[in-house]
Image: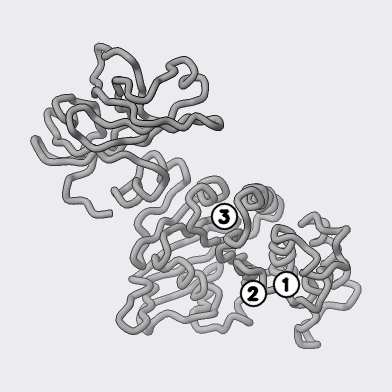
Amino acid sequence: MSIEVRHITRQFGKFKALDDVTLKVESGELVALLGPSGSGKTTLLRIIAGLEFPDPGPAQVLFYGDDVTHLPASQRKAGFAFQHYALFRHLSVFENIAFGLRVRPRATRPPERDILQRVETLLKLVQLEPLAQRYPAQLSGGQRQRVALARALAVEPKVLLLDEPFGALDAKVRKDLRRWLRRLHDEIHITTLFVTHDQEEALEVADRVAIMRDGRIEQIGTPDDIYDRPASPFIYDFLGNVNLFHGRIHEGRVLIGDTAFEAARGAGGPQSQAVAFVRPHDIRVTREASGRSTLAARLVRCHAAGPVAQLELERLDGGAAFAVQLSRDQFRQLQPQPGEQLFVELQNVRVFSDDYSI
């Protein structure tokens, strides 16, 4: 069961939340809508769910090729789970999950035996069998979210829509639950679209990621594609930490200060001004300048707790400060000291023209 939206536009007063958005989620695929606050991702999800409607025009919402653009949410057979669970406090876990089945009109309501069997199957699927008779107030945040997901699945939806499903949870629980969600999806293969502003979450869980900005989809691709081959400076900057080095293109390389580094092709014409993007883990640090291209820098401070050491350095040629990440073994081998002069080699440099905007 695929989800497809075509030419979706939605304006609230003078603010254009969505601007001609087109997207297709293939049957059985799990796609993340990722972007900063105000980028339009939740509005798009609500339009797909039928909780809101697009502006008049050529807009279409299709479930497996069927046009559901003007159908209300109750007729779309979409499962929807919210960030804050929206569980019924006076109902047990079992009855919360059964709710969507029990409130169906008599003509379409399953027999009680089938409802009981369906809920018991879902309780096992979300690993909450021992908690069936508890109430929401007696559950942890992670357990409540699993109840909300089971309730969304109980009505056997055509598609599953998740709006920041782990946004209200602490970091440890978020990590555990997103791994659980990925395993769950691999078991049931329901077409799923989920909204998040957490880059790590999207890259870890989704088959593909659609990055939104100012009401448009800026790039869509597999996690590896968008991380390794970002289409714009905005995406490069949005997906994790990044250092910016101002320079210019010369003979296919980027000049930063007086040093030339290899860079991705197509970064601008000869002698054009450019900005080089380098991730902290793509910087090699040594005590001596090698035969390779290096920049001299002074170590300002370092933080070595945990598996990755975080270093802050400043260029000796007057350029801006930048960040470096070293593995624990690399840091122990180098043992750099604050104030010490070091040399850095920039690797996997990606260059954009200097007229970019983030």
- Residue 148 position within the rendered picture, expressed as x and y whole percent measured from the top left: 70, 67
* First in sequence: mark 2 vs mark 1: 2
User: Which residue corresponds to mark 1?
Assistant: 155
- Residue 241: which disc? none
Instruction: Check disc 1 and give the amino acid type.
Output: Val
Viewer-closest of 307 and 335: 335
- Residue 234 position within the rendered picture, expressed as x and y whole percent measured from the top left: 32, 52
Viewer-closest of 160 and 244: 244
Dividing the image into 4 quarters, which one contains the C terminus? bottom left
The answer to whether the residues at label 2 and label 1 have Cβ atoms under 8 Å apart is yes
Viewer-closest of 47 and 303: 303
* First in sequence: mark 3 vs mark 1: 3
User: Which residue corresponds to mark 2?
Assistant: 77
Q: Residue at x 48, y 58 (%)?
A: 197
Judging from the image, what secondary structure is the residue with disc 1 in? loop
User: Which residue corresponds to mark 3?
Assistant: 29
Quarter of the view holding residue 15: bottom left
Please indicate, yes or no, whether residue 339 appears anywhere in the rendered image: yes
Judging from the image, what secondary structure is the residue with disc 3 in? loop
Residue at the far left in the pictured view: 271
- Residue 161 position within the rendered picture, expressed as x and y whole percent measured from the top left: 58, 66
Label 2, label 3: how far apart the Cα atoms are = 17 Å
